[in-house]
Image (tube, helix red, strand yellow):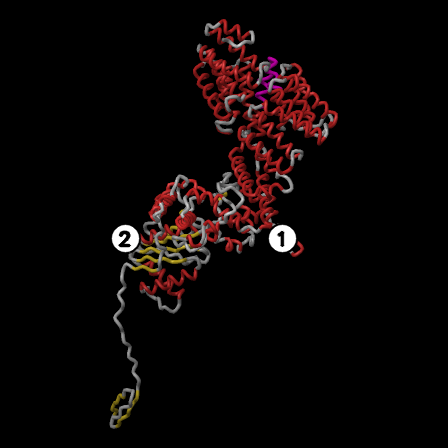
Amino acid sequence: MNVAAGGDVVASAIGDGASVVNRYEVHHHHHAPEVISWPMRIGTPPVPPSAAQPRQAVRQRIDAARRLGRTVVLTQVLSGGGGVGKSQLAAAYAREAMVTGTDLVVWVPAAEVRDVILAYARAAARVRAPGATGEEPEQDARCFLDWLAATNRSWLVVLDDVGDLTAMSGWWPSGGSDEGWVLATTRRRDAAVTGGGRRMVEVGVFTPRESDAYLSTRLTEADCPQLFDAESGALAEALGHLPLALSHAAAYMVDMGESCEGYLRLFRDRSTGLARLFPAHADGDGYGRAVDVTLLLNLAAADSHPPVGLASPGMYLAGLLAPAGHPESFWATTPVVAYFGRDRDPAKGDEPVTTAQARDVLSLLNRYGLLTWQKDGSPDAVQVHALTARAAREHTPPQVGTDAAYTAADALLAVWPRLDAPESGLAAVLRANASTLRDLAEAHLWRPEPHEVLFTTGNSLSDVGLYTAAVDYWRAFADACADALGPDHLDTIRARAHLASSYRNAGRTTEAIPLEEAVLADRERLLGPDHPDTLAARANLAHSYWQAGRTDEAVPLEESVLADRRRLLGPDHLDTIRARAHLASSYRNAGRTTEAIPLEEAVLADRERLLGPDHPDTFTARANLVFSYRLAGRMEEAVVFSERLLDDRERVLGSDHPDTLRARVHLASSYWNAGRTAEAVVQGESNRVESERVLGPDHPDTHTIRANLAVYYQEAGRSGDAIALHEDVLADRQRSLGPDHPDTLTAQANLADSYRKGGRPDDAVRLEETVLAGRLRVLGADHPDTHRVRTHLAASYRQAGRADDAVAVDEGRMPR
């Protein structure tokens, strides 16, 4: 038998002959199967950051949600904006699972679904998933999901930074052992996040305590404890308690030897960009991206979704608003719709932007984690982190800045309520946003003249009773107008007129009057004596004269305003009728009630004829007439009118409107004046509850309502209740209005009266001496209120047995 080189020869005999067949044999060398080693780790989670915080509150929410899914895989989706530490939280769970012996821990970067599929395919090979061949990644990935669903081993799959929720459909693990679960992180807030039994846990920023602990630990670990100083809390607040920003800031401080105070000073300098505040070399914890890039990471993706291209301009707009929140209605205003459509060209066939699309921008920015929309209808429902807003501003193209600022101002005006008091929460939020806008983009709001939102903000402070704040606002604004526009510009004069009104509202009439006299002179010089603004200045001055007790000057001025408006506008013009109403009020305040009543009856008739019986101005005319009827002793008419007024205002304006509340006050006063004390007490107690609910406990109208109720208590023989309530009112007015405000002095006088009637003349004397000194200082010796206090003080002296002192006061002298 021949043997061929390199091959095997197999010979076989068949019958008598022999044949030779050449055949190559393939030898398979089967190695022993590789033993799978458990526990198994696939993928690499981020290393623990320096000074890691336990974040117990967030972890408790994660653990609570996990307990709800004991028998099936539970997907916790940690959702939140950039830099809040979602990945680090997930990594902490992964590391803990490794330490506690979980059989399989898989860390999957999930920004792109193809990366998820490849990670699953690699895992399939590692765990020897049945059916996995190593040839088709998608097939192997599905084999891995099948293995997870069938295995009895414990496992944790972390899907970090899930980007495309639609593409992830079908790639979420499910089933498996009681100990199998999925933890995912994402910036997205789509409804798809919580589909398929997944539970979302919102991850926010550090708590103030966590921020402080982080900075202290981080700087101490770097052997720089001296950099941690008293400004650490303010620095954390300025950084919005954002973990990413705190990490970069701490690294910068360590590198540069900068203290918390020094870094805070640098941060507050708006000329310092985020790139300098958070440089790449300060990424000590390996986040891998610049802070501004991280915060706006999803913006390009959001721009690519319908309505295409509007996410970026939306962020430029949001970046100018208060981080604490603004109303969602802002996004559906006409100015915002026009802003989004500014680059649309109908000549090129571009469709205009609709209100629905403008609102869709808000939804889009929320879905991509660029801002937060609570969807609860609250005034501050839409919030944006302060650093995200700053990053958006730094990326705003210069040519868009002015447009965005004016749009924001116009949109705030569009949602501002007509009356602030019944919507005080909304008004407060809008003032905060206007303040932020002014702080960030004031230069844009003065071209060519001050934007109306700047005036509305100041008026809002007065409308809700924040008189001291209004004075501060208008003083600064009037100075700014004078510097920017000159002293003779009409907006400068307008600002000074508002400052004078705020002085009057704050009880500082002696400061209001010279300013109003100057405003009147300027308007007469620049606009002429017959201009509406000149007539308004005369009316304002008359009101201040009356408040200062200078009735002899107030009444002729009101008569002049009425004559001028009748001559220029005619008897039926609403401004003429308003002037007639003001004159009637001046007559009433001067004690000329018999002259006031015919005027007020004519005003009521004119307004019913021209405006209708249900117009707010008609209601005001009826309320003024009620007041005059009471002063004239026409009590039954006052009660009937008061009851009708309350019914009408509740029907037309609703129960929570401030004018409805004032109608309740009129009714209680009418009951009291008519001797129906029990009804006055019941109505007064109801008024107190409603005022505290609608206006708040610190509103001046609430103080007045409580003071009235104390008077009713006194009349009803409830002296103890009256004194306690008067004392509360006095304390509140001293705190909110100051010691010299006329309302504070009135509260002191009311309390003294209750002391005297309650048999405490020495306490009454002590207070009334203070009140008299205040009236003399603020109002002068000839003001009617000053005379009234003298009379009460003399009565208290007599009750206390100090007859000589009483005589001295009666004679206009102060006692020894």
Quarter occupied by residue 543: top right
Placement of 519 over or under 334, stated as above or below: above
Nearer to the camera, 276 or 802: 276
Q: Is residue 116 in view?
A: yes
Q: Is residue 202 in view?
A: no
Q: Position of residue 354 (x, y in %)?
A: 60, 48
Residue 641 on the magenta span: yes
Nearer to the camera, 453 or 440: 440
Helix, strand or loop status at disc 1: loop
Placement of 122 over or under 367, stated as above or below: below
Which of marks 2 and 1 precedes in the sequence?
2
State the CA–CA distance, disc 1 to disc 2. Answer: 59 Å
Quadrant containing the N terminus is bottom left
* Residue at point 66%, 19% (across, down): 553
Asked if residue 230 lies left or right of residue 99, the reply is right
Check disc 1 and report the residue beneath it.
Answer: 344
* Residue at point 60%, 33% (across, down): 478
Asked if residue 757 lies left or right of residue 72, the reply is right
Q: Which residues are magenta?
A: 625-645
Name the dominant secondary structure of the magenta segment.
Answer: helix
Residue 774 on the magenta span: no
Check disc 2 and report the residue beneath it.
Answer: 100
Helix, strand or loop status at disc 2: loop
Q: Position of residue 129 (x, y in %)?
A: 33, 64
Asked if residue 310 lies left or right of residue 202, the reply is right
Q: Amino acid at mark 1?
A: Arg
Q: Quick one: which residue is furthest to the right in this view?
A: 567
Placement of 452 over or under 190, stated as above or below: above
